[in-house]
Image: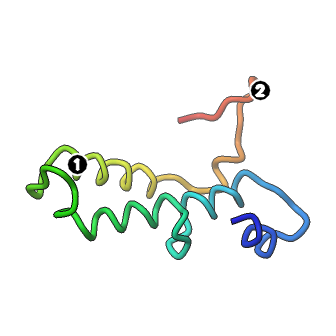
Amino acid sequence: SLVIYRRRNPGKISVAGVAELVLFDVDNPRSLVYQLERLREHPKSLPGSSGSSRPERIVDDVAMRLRRIEPDELEDVTAEGKRDE
């Protein structure tokens, strides 16, 4: 992932750039969104799967929350160094 990050963002490190790679990159097998999509494609592989099982609802909830986040917004912090939810 470091090689890919450096290729995409030469000479700079940013929260948004790292988030784009490890959270939002649909083509990066190490990203969260990639893994969530694989889980959504194969719900029968989850223990206790019924189409509305707890693991499936959790995956859907996390995917929905992730879609609401813009990587650039992760750069913004309060005066105390905290991020808004």
Indicate the secondary structure of the residue bearing disc 1.
helix
Residue placed most toward the observer, 85 or 11: 11
In which quarter of the view is residue 13 placed? bottom right
User: In the displayed structure, would residue 12 be above or below residue 56?
Assistant: below
In which quarter of the view is residue 54 placed? top left
Q: Residue at x 59, y 34 (%)?
A: 84
The picture places residue 21, in percent across and down from the top left corner, at 63, 64
Mark seen at residue 79: 2
Q: Quadrant of the N terminus?
A: bottom right
Please give the count of numbered marks on the rendered protein.
2
Q: Residue at x 65, y 47 (%)?
A: 74
Relative placement, left or right, of 21 versus 68 is: right
The picture places residue 50, in percent across and down from the top left corner, at 8, 55
Q: Earlier in the sequence, mark 1 or mark 2?
A: 1
Mark seen at residue 57: 1
Residue placed most toward the observer, 78 or 4: 4
Q: Nearer the viewer, mark 1 or mark 2?
A: 1
Q: Residue at x 72, y 51 (%)?
A: 15
User: In the displayed structure, would residue 83 be above or below residue 21?
Assistant: above
The residue most toward the top is 80
Indicate the secondary structure of the residue bearing disc 2.
loop
The picture places residue 16, in percent across and down from the top left corner, at 69, 56
Residue placed most toward the observer, 47 or 33: 47
Under mark 2, the amino acid is Ala
